[in-house]
């Protein structure tokens, strides 16, 4: 399992949608962690809109305050606890306000929030959002409410999620939930349950609906998208035996990619996250075949040491990862690649750390998400391995990894200088209201003067300069996608 943390500037941002006429109650919802959490918050808002709630950016006026939580690292949990303190301070002023915890942290800590700490009124796990109407009734009648039951088949494929606080250009579409990979450092299999895939028909319907609403790019989302597999008869559990299952028509991830690309040829398609052990060549060939499938892969490795990868229960070696990188570059020469990296995993030696740095030198990632190891209660690593790397060693190794990644990011952005690339305008640049900001197919941010272009346009941009994270250029005309 991998979870890519989204833009830190969006962490905790209050999510808001257009008010539904007739709704009298107000919902304030914040999300932390990965893209899946933000996608789940849209599902929650959709369900609660049918229960009379409109979203608000003002916590003080909310009838219900929800925080969608992350347990992937201790820092994320501590951030949520601080927010809960803030909620409860507001609740003392507005005693009618109810507070609930959603997501992975709710699943991990279960009723502790209610019974020991008494800081929330409601605890709802990632598979229990459809039970929110019943849980709200429990709360309104003065009882604590908790549902953290994990499901073997819930995909929320029948829920049409609202789009919260977005730019109206890009959106997430969940295709799988849960994870069957038992990486020893990760809590996700315990907080989100077993892996299950969503009916491709419902995925296409959601993508078509987004296109009709003017969205220009979607990201197919899952803990491990490459293991997506939908059988014509339904889920694996619907078959009596393996023979019956094999006879059923199946859709794998490469086929799903093609179905989505064909359904909306003028819409950009991205996906996240991939797992090195599960990515197959047919996915790469699908990417190469369709111009609207972006040439970008988030391909977490976590460590460059085969020994540490084995301790992490990653089902690939250093050498196999190199082979996959070579295959990606052979089939998609201009593919952008990003990484997740954990440093300071138990027993990691200096030699292991040097293996990570040398792997990074081989790949030269476009960008990455790098963290010190944080022991998570309940994981195999927490049960079996002593967190024996000193904090100062972890920090020093992380600094070396980050510094090397910045060097490689600068190298990759420099490769764009002098080229003309397609950019999808997403928003105004943070640094200048005279410039637009968007992304290339390789997921690299580009900024350029606004001129007569607008948000949602595909524009050809001549890259004239760069930083290690941003391309700087000038628009030279519309992309053919706009025609």
Image (cartoon, rainbow, N blue to C red):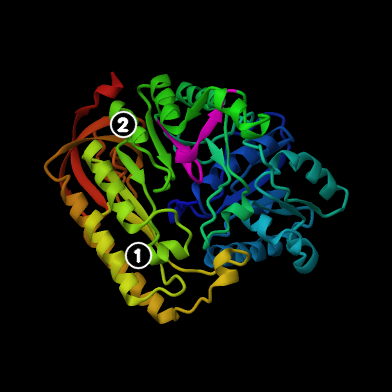
Q: CA distance from mark 2 to mark 1?
A: 29 Å
* Residue drawn at point x = 69 percent, y = 47 percent: 150
- Mark yes or no: residue 447 visible: no
Q: Which mark is residue 381?
A: none
Q: Provide residue 148's location: percent of width, then percent of height.
A: 72, 51
- Compared across the picture, whether 159 is left or right of 361 comes to right
Determine whether 410 is above or below 164 in the image. below
- The C terminus: image quadrant: top left
Q: Residues within 10 Å of mark 1 (few under 14, many from 20)?
A: many
Which range of residues does the magenta coloring cover? 217-232
Residue situated furthest right in the rendering? 141
- Is 223 part of what is drawn in magenta? yes
- Is 377 part of what is drawn in magenta? no
Quarter residue 282 falls in: top left
- Compared across the picture, whether 426 is left or right of 472 comes to right
Front residue of 404 and 246 = 246
Q: Which residue is mark 1?
A: 305
Front residue of 116 and 10 = 116
Q: Residues within 10 Å of mark 2 (few under 14, many from 20)?
A: some
Q: Secondary structure at mark 1?
A: loop
* Residue drawn at point x = 28 percent, y = 45 percent: 336
Q: Which residue is mark 2?
A: 285
- Mark yes or no: residue 76 visible: yes
Q: Provide residue 13's location: percent of width, then percent of height.
A: 53, 51
* Residue drawn at point x = 41 percent, y = 62 percent: 309
Q: Provide residue 200's location: percent of width, then percent of height.
A: 53, 26
Front residue of 255 and 5 = 255
Q: Provide residue 279's location: percent of width, then percent of height.
A: 39, 42
Residue situated furthest top in the rendering? 483
Q: Secondary structure at mark 2?
A: helix
């Amino acid at each position: 399992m991998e979870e890519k943390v989204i833009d830190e500037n969006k962490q905790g941002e209050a999510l808001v949608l257009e008010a539904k006429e007739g709704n009298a109650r107000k919902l304030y919802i914040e999300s932390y962690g990965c893209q899946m959490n933000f996608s789940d918050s849209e599902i929650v808002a959709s369900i609660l809109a049918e229960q009379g709630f409109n979203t608000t950016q003002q916590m003080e006026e909310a009838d219900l305050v929800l925080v969608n939580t992350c347990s992937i690292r201790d820092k994320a949990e501590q951030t949520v606890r601080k927010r809960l303190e803030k909620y409860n301070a507001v609740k003392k002023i507005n005693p009618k306000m109810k507070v609930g915890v959603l997501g992975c942290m709710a699943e991990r800590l279960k009723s502790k929030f209610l019974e020991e700490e008494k800081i929330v009124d409601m605890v709802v796990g990632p598979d229990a959002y459809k039970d929110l109407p019943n849980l709200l009734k429990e709360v309104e009648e003065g009882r604590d409410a908790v549902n953290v039951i994990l499901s073997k088949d819930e995909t929320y494929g029948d829920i049409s999620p609202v789009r919260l606080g977005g730019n109206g250009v890009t959106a997430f579409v969940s295709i799988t939930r849960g994870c069957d990979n038992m990486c020893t450092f990760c809590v996700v299999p315990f907080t989100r349950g077993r892996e299950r895939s969503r009916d491709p028909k419902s995925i296409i319907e959601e993508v078509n609906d987004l296109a009709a609403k003017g969205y220009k790019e979607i990201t197919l989302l899952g803990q491990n998208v490459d293991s997506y597999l939908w059988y014509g008869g339904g889920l694996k559990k619907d078959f009596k035996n393996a023979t019956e299952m094999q006879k059923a028509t199946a859709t794998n991830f490469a086929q799903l990619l093609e179905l989505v690309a064909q359904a909306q040829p003028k819409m950009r398609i991205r996906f996240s996250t991939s797992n090195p052990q599960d990515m197959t060549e047919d996915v790469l060939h699908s990417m190469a075949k369709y111009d609207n499938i972006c040439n970008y892969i988030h391909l977490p490795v976590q460590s460059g040491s085969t020994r540490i990868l084995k301790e992490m229960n990653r089902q690939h070696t250093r050498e196999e990862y190199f082979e996959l990188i070579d295959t990606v570059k052979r089939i998609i020469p201009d593919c952008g690649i990003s990484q997740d990296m954990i440093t300071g995993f138990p027993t990691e030696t200096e030699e292991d750390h040097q293996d990570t740095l040398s792997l990074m030198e081989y790949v030269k990632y476009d960008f990455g998400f790098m963290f010190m190891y944080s022991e998570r209660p309940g994981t195999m690593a927490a049960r079996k391995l002593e967190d024996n790397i000193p904090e100062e060693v972890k920090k020093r190794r992380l600094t070396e990894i980050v510094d090397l990644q910045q060097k490689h990011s600068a190298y990759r952005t420099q490769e764009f200088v002098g080229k003309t690339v397609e950019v999808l305008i997403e928003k105004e640049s943070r640094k200048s209201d005279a410039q637009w900001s968007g992304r290339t197919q390789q997921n690299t941010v580009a900024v350029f003067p606004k001129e007569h272009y607008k948000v949602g346009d595909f524009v050809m941009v001549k890259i004239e300069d760069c930083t290690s994270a941003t391309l700087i250029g000038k628009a030279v005309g519309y992309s053919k996608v706009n025609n």
